Image (spheres, grey):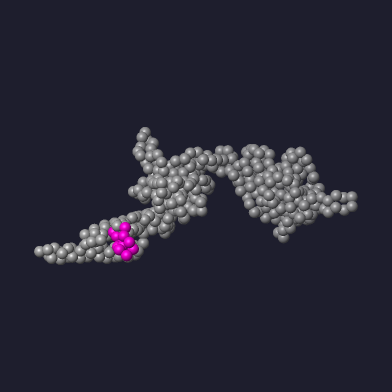
Amino acid sequence: MDVFTAMQTAVSGLKAQAFSLDNISGNIANSQTTGFKRVDTSFVDLVAEQQTPSRQVAGSVAANSRQTTTVQGNLNATDIGTNMALNGEGFFAVATKSGDANGQSNFATGDSYTRRGDFALDKDGYLVNGGGAYLKGSSLDPLTGQATGEGPIKVSNSIIPAHATTTITYSANLPKTPATSAADANKPNSELIGDSAWRASSTGAQVKISDPADIQKFVATSIAGPALTAYTPSGGPVGIQMRWAKVQNGAAANGATPATNDIWNLYYADKSTVSDSGTSWVNAGTDFQFNSSGQLISPASNAVTIPALTVGDVNLGNVQLNYGSGGLTAYTSAGGTVTTNTQTQDGYTSGTLTGLSITTDGKVSGTYSNGNTIALANIKVVQFTNSDGLKANSNGTYQQTLESGTALVGLNGTTVVGSNVEQSNTDIAGEFSKMIVTQQAYSANTKVISTAQDMMSALINIIR
């Protein structure tokens, strides 16, 4: 290695440090860019000649970029429900808009990928981030929850239709000894509610209590059950009042007398507004039998059907009462009243979209004026075996390469954080430190060049 080679090596050092400064300047410039991943610089030595160890000299240098796509930036909370950030590895799949034709947006084929999650609705209802990338995923039918197509997510602001009540989900504990207004709640069956004919028939046919005197006795010997609002197919509300009546007290086996179980019947009012004597009560048609331990033994299923549930002049049709496994019990209760654990129904009136939010499992959920929150789309999130092998494009997007591997769809342990964005992972203090070191190294390389020049001048002066 000679003086000329030393100058060439110093020039390579100047180029390498200039390359490093270029990355530093870009990192600092994008310190406030949402989802930006800083680019670090790695240096590699180049040996021009193969020499023996005793004659080997330090060679020139080259500078390469080192991506930091796997280094997460801080999450910053926002007031925008459609903003989102990935807590963990992965990228949002996005599309680039290629133009508009006949009032329809056209998008380029293929996916790009980004960590920039400042998505918001555009005028057409698409979710687009600040870099102009459109979020991709699968749209869901708001009524069935089934996927209807995949591509850029478009949120419709159309009214969701009403849904009639078809299922009541209910779980509760019925007291072993009900606290009724009657003198003794543990009287025999015929005295408990006045007439054994009021019980559910063996065929499951409904029985209606309509005589005013019987109604008063029924109310006095029963306890309040579920009370809820159901909905007709057009979304009209219907108030449903129910009561539980214990129609048989269980008894242990005694000689020739077989053991019996506690039996309860469920009744509902035929009017939304209940009065002591003017409201008839309809038996739902099922004997609920409990053993001495308070566990439901019949029906064996987890749900029963209330046939032709009719309140006033509104027939809701067959409504399923779903209590699930272990949802109905008859344990001893000090208060003697029903302890309700779950009480919901699946009907609702029509509604308009009032807001959007993002769930941790990557769903775009819409909140509607009828109080419902419905999943509207699944966000497409992908991961790569080598994320640092992605090729960076403008506007915070990346392209798949051979080095990155193929995209693996799924969160795979990553969570989506709504109303947040990921900040740049640039550390200003760290970049200033690197800039100082780069400046010193650049100046030192210039000193090598000036020294080599002095040495060459001295050699030329010898000739002279």
Tell me residue 98's x, y (percent).
35, 39
Region rendered in magenta:
50-61
Tell me residue 398's x, y (percent).
38, 48
Residue closer to the observer: 216 or 390: 390
Seen at 38% across and 55% down, the residue is 67
Evaluate whether residue 278 shows in this view. Answer: no
- Classify 55 as above or below 287: below
Where does the N terminus fall, quadrant-wise? bottom left
Farthest residue in the top direction? 102
Residue closer to the observer: 232 or 434: 434
Tell me residue 277's x, y (percent).
71, 46
Evaluate whether residue 433 shows in this view. Answer: yes
- Classify 347 as above or below 183: above
Q: In which quarter of the image is residue 451?
A: bottom left
Seen at 83% across and 51% down, the residue is 259
Q: Across the whole image, how many numbered discs are drawn on residues?
A: 0
Position of 18 compared to 322: left or right?
A: left
Q: Does the magenta stretch include residue 356?
A: no
Q: Quadrant of residue 232?
A: top right
Tell me residue 141's x, y (percent).
51, 40
Farthest residue in the left direction? 464
Where does the C terminus fall, quadrant-wise? bottom left
Position of 162 compared to 355: left or right?
A: right
Seen at 51% across and 51% down, the residue is 412
Q: Does the magenta stretch include residue 52?
A: yes
Seen at 81% across and 48% down, the residue is 190
Position of 52 compared to 456: left or right?
A: right
